[in-house]
Amino acid sequence: TLSFYKSNKTPTPQQHHHHQQQKHSTKKNPSCKEEAIHQQQQEEEKQQPKKASSLDQEIESFVSKEGYGEIVSSKPMGSSGWASFRRVEVSDSNVGDFFVKSSSRSAKEMFEGEALGLKAMYACSRGEDGLRIPKVYHYGDYTSGSGSLIIMEYLTLAGRSDDRSLGRAVAK
């Protein structure tokens, strides 16, 4: 079949396919030793822990610093055009789950106003009037500078609300 390529004749499709197979089969095949090394490298890569994202690192740092034990689970809960949301469960049974919002923008731009407003409403409400305001535990920029987050109490919202009580609580 190689003679067809050396001459001006056009090879048939079968001859062309045969030539391609021959060409690929002449490539150097890896030795058994090279193959074993390659397989070992793949196994080592599988065993190495995956690198945590900046958000994961920030949450772990907060949980550790505050003495809440370890993170048991961290589940994404969706996103908007400007932030992502997740529910984080920790091993300390004395504290409930956390609701974490994160963004690629700065904390001052994204979460400072929300955090200050929620802290003020939480201080006034305390849940006595039927209005549940989540406690803000932390907000700020990632230590890497690549985003920000706000960590607050996760509220399980269920049932019907009392609009009259809500109006009175907001007016307070």
Image: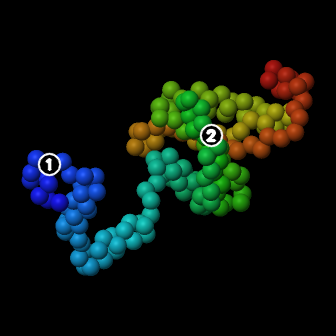
Residue placed most toward the observer, 137 or 7: 7
Name the residue: 53% across, 54% down: 60
Q: Is residue 68 visible?
A: no
Residue 86 appears at what percent x and percent y?
62, 45
Residue position marked by numbered label 1 in the rendering:
9
Residue 74 appears at what percent x and percent y?
61, 53
Left or right of 1, for residue 97: right
Residue placed most toward the observer, 149 or 103: 103
Q: The residue under label 2 is which amino acid type?
A: Gly
The quarter of the rendered structure image containing the N terminus is bottom left
The quarter of the rendered structure image containing the C terminus is top right
Mark number for residue 78? Answer: 2
Residue 147 appears at what percent x and percent y?
46, 37
Name the residue: 83% across, 41% down: 158
CA neighbours of label 1 inside 10 A, class few (<14), some (14 to 19), many (20+): few
- Give the quadrant of residue 30: bottom left
Q: The residue under label 1 is which amino acid type?
A: Lys
Label 1 vs 2, first from the N-terminus:
1
